[in-house]
């Protein structure tokens, strides 16, 4: 049943015919009786019903059946040529998170307990019966036969853990803050296909703040200045910064909120939980002066930014503001049974606040708005603290452990006193394009951790800082939650190689065996991500990494990737047409080149220090040739284009000035990250480095060319090299509005072959 409330006024035409009938009826229903009135002094959006549909509160009994139409629509998007060969049968009585797959050739039946579980059953069938892969990114569905194969015998699978959570707080920033609904929809389809049931929804999360805070002494203009551009909003929601990349317009906020509402509704339609941001006390400066009885704590500095203030949750004003926030959120996003909050993230200050009492007040405000809702808190650095855990009902708490595969000697039951947690992985930081993950650590830990007599392991948490890289890691990590027995890593990768390109191939198997032994078998102890590239590093003869916070050396033998490239180039020509093969080939060639940067730079340094100008020029020419080739090979794949990133950002601006502002928001995140104090003092420059065509040629290659020119001049003239203000160099790039292709060009196979020819043979790379 539709819920009374208010929908944001559309600022762009909505294709109503494309919306589900039930949602269309809600949109066209008109004003709702008893709709919440806008706060005093706030702009009044049109008072029509919310795009978000009704959602059962936490603890509500499961429906006797459910509508399979959303799952059927997703199946049509995923398998447009074969969707008609599947029959999807709702079966809530099968038990939570259970599917059964059966059927004859061309007539496959999937029964499942939710729409998402039906899709997980389809994913299992593709993986284990049809031998095809729909990855993130790349697929081999073009290799499927016209008539799908029969299921030899009915197979039933149940999830091993109730919580299968996805998306880091930073994903919206690093993966694409300016994505379309169709792109988010594709992400949801993939998550459901791989067994995820809880998804963080961040898009539009600024709008409830914007609406609610206008009732507490702030003008709309003040708040638009306070709220960052979309590219930086992830860290504003984490209470790390404010304002940067803005100001935002009310039109943009309304559009983003409407988009977030549609994403939440899409998740609900599949029986998945939209995990919404909760309210834990973030306020603009001067809040206490404008609200009697309020007590705030200045949060100090985060990486060169002044953090927003923290409103003491125990103060009486907190409950009122939280109630206003949740009411505004409900009007646009609907209700949920799970909310995401991490107070005092990365160094927040407690002042004189009793953390336990504050945590209890935060949970109390959440439950006042959403009785019994689960609070999801990130396990990161020292959080959550014992003081926070002591103040809450931990049966309504889930810790998303971001360090499960990073460090050794972890005992989560002792550390968190038996509080339920999800084993998580952050194998990507900042959107780096580097290949690899600690997959062997996942397999070594998940089963034993779950089997402990006192185990509090209740889920998995898929938490890379950016999604859309490392399809093998995504597939394997999500498989953990659905495989009843231990997974053999070597066997799994062999199966992945076969379905990734549509059928078994000896060269593909050999390539993925090399990748398994190398970048996908890195160990825990200090890192959960592989090293990044020196081509994307700020120039220095002593550079050991691009991002300050990344590994400083190779985490696996470089020869494994070099050999994998050779094997991929020998894959059967009949299997080279899939997007999965093309992406893997380009990505492996890119990684092989990136790894070679760590061999070449020390040689350049040695030539410079020996004052051997001729050799210095030969080696730097080789470096420049490598970067040109790197830009070309990445330009042949649609997933590795700067132009796509920039055109999405500009598409959200109503005029040239707004378009330029959002392009700066998007560019700065990839380069300077923030202002000078952030880039230099906070060491965040190049934190989000990635080897993308356009970014390589326009920033990274120009940067190295300028640097080598100063060294060449120094050697030729016998003088010290000129100093370069790198922040100014990078800031100038961030302020550009040059255009770049948003469509791939060039032949991936030819370009990958050129990479292999330019590199030393595998035997020489270790």
Image (cartoon, rainbow, N blue to C red):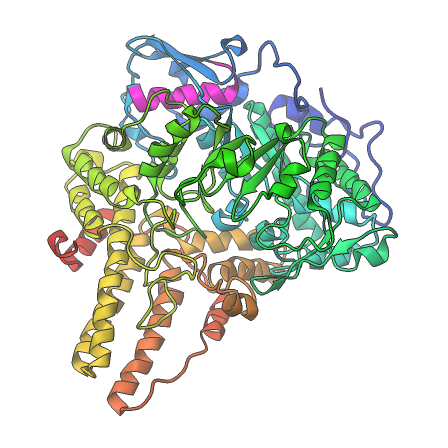
Look at the image and say whether residue 124 sits in the magenta stretch: yes
- Report the residue at 36% width, 35% height from top: 442
Range of residues picked out in magenta: 112-128
Q: Residue, x 48% and y 29% (percent of image)?
A: 457
Residue placed most toward the observer, 460 or 501: 460
Is 305 left or right of 667, judged from the image as shown? right
Q: How many marks?
A: 0
In the image, residue 609 above or below residue 752 = below
Q: Quadrant of the N terminus?
A: top right
Q: Residue 393, image x and y in percent?
A: 67, 31
Residue in the foreground of this view, choosing between 244 and 571: 244
> Is residue 334 in view from this perspective?
yes
Task: Pinpoint residue 406: horizontal percent, then vertical percent.
Answer: 40, 45
Image quadrant of residue 4?
A: top right
The main secondary structure of the magenta stretch is helix
* Residue 349, image x, y percentages: 66, 55
> Residue 561 vs residue 237: left or right?
left
Q: Is residue 675 magenta?
A: no
Residue 605 in the image: above or below residue 50: below
């Amino acid at each position: 049943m539709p819920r009374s409330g208010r929908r944001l006024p559309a600022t762009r035409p909505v294709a109503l015919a494309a919306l589900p009938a039930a949602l269309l009826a809600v949109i066209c229903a008109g004003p709702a009786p008893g709709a919440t009135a806008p706060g005093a002094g706030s702009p009044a959006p049109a008072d029509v019903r919310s795009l978000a549909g009704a959602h059962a509160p936490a603890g509500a009994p499961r429906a006797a059946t459910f509508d399979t139409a959303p799952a059927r629509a997703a199946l049509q998007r995923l398998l447009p040529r074969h969707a008609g060969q599947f029959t999807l049968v709702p079966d809530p009585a099968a038990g939570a998170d259970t599917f059964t797959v059966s059927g004859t050739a061309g007539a496959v039946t999937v029964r499942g307990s939710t729409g998402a579980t039906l899709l997980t059953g389809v994913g299992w069938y593709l993986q284990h019966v049809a031998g095809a892969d729909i990855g993130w990114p790349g697929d081999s569905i073009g290799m499927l036969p016209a008539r799908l194969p029969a299921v030899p015998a009915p197979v039933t699978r149940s999830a091993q853990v109730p919580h299968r959570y996805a998306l880091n707080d930073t994903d919206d920033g690093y993966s694409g803050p300016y994505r379309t609904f169709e792109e988010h929809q594709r992400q949801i389809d993939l998550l459901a296909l791989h067994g995820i049931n809880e998804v963080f929804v961040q898009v539009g999360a600024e709008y409830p703040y914007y609406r609610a805070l206008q009732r507490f002494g702030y003008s709309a203009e003040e708040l638009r200045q306070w709220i960052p551009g979309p590219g930086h909003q992830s860290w504003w929601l984490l209470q790390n910064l404010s304002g940067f990349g803005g100001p935002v317009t009310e039109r943009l906020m309304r559009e983003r909120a409407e988009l977030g509402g549609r994403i939440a509704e899409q998740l609900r339609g599949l029986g998945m939980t939209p995990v919404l941001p909760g309210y834990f006390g973030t306020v603009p400066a001067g809040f206490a002066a404008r609200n009697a009885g309020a007590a705030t704590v200045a949060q100090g500095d985060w990486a060169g930014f002044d953090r927003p203030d923290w409103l003491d949750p125990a103060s009486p004003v907190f409950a009122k503001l939280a109630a206003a926030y949740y009411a505004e959120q409900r009007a646009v996003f609907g209700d949920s049974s799970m909310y995401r909050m991490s107070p005092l993230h990365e160094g927040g200050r407690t002042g004189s606040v009793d953390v336990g009492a504050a945590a209890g007040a935060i949970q109390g405000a959440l439950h006042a708005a959403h009785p019994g809702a689960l609070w999801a808190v990130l396990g990161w650095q020292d959080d959550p603290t014992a003081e926070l855990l002591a103040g809450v009902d931990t049966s309504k708490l889930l810790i998303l452990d971001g360090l499960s595969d990073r460090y050794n000697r972890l005992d989560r039951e002792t550390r968190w006193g038996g509080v339920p947690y999800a084993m998580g992985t952050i194998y990507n930081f900042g959107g780096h394009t580097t290949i690899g993950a600690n997959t062997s650590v996942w397999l070594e830990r998940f089963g034993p951790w779950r089997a402990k007599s006192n185990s509090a392991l209740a889920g998995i948490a898929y938490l890379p800082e950016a999604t859309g890289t490392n399809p093998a890691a995504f597939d394997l990590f999500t498989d953990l939650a659905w495989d009843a027995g231990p997974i053999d890593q070597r066997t799994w990768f062999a199966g992945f190689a076969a379905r990734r390109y549509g059928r078994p191939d000896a060269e593909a198997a050999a390539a993925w065996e090399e990748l398994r032994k190398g970048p996908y078998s890195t160990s825990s102890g200090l890192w959960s991500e592989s090293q990044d590239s020196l081509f994307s590093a700020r120039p220095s003869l002593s550079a050991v990494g691009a991002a300050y916070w990344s590994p400083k050396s190779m985490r696996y033998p470089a020869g494994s990737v070099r050999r994998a490239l050779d094997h991929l180039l020998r894959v059967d020509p009949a299997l080279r047409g899939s997007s999965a093969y093309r992406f893997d080939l380009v990505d492996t060639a890119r990684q092989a080149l990136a790894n070679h940067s760590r061999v070449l730079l020390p040689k350049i340094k040695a030539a410079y220090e020996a004052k051997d100008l001729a050799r210095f020029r030969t080696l730097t020419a080789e470096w420049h040739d490598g970067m040109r080739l790197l830009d070309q090979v990445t330009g042949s794949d649609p997933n590795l284009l700067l132009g796509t990133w920039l055109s999405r950002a500009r598409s959200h601006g109503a005029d040239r000035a707004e378009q330029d502002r959002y392009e700066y928001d998007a560019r700065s995140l990839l380069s300077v990250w923030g202002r000078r104090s952030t880039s230099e003092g906070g060491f965040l420059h190049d934190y989000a480095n990635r080897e993308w065509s356009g970014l390589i040629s326009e920033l990274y290659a120009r940067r190295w060319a300028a640097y080598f020119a100063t060294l060449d001049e120094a050697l030729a003239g016998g003088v010290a090299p000129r100093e370069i203000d790198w922040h100014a160099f990078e800031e100038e790039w961030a302020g550009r509005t040059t255009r770049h292709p948003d469509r791939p060009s060039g032949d991936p196979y030819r370009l990958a072959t050129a990479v292999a020819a330019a590199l030393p043979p595998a035997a020489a790379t270790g």
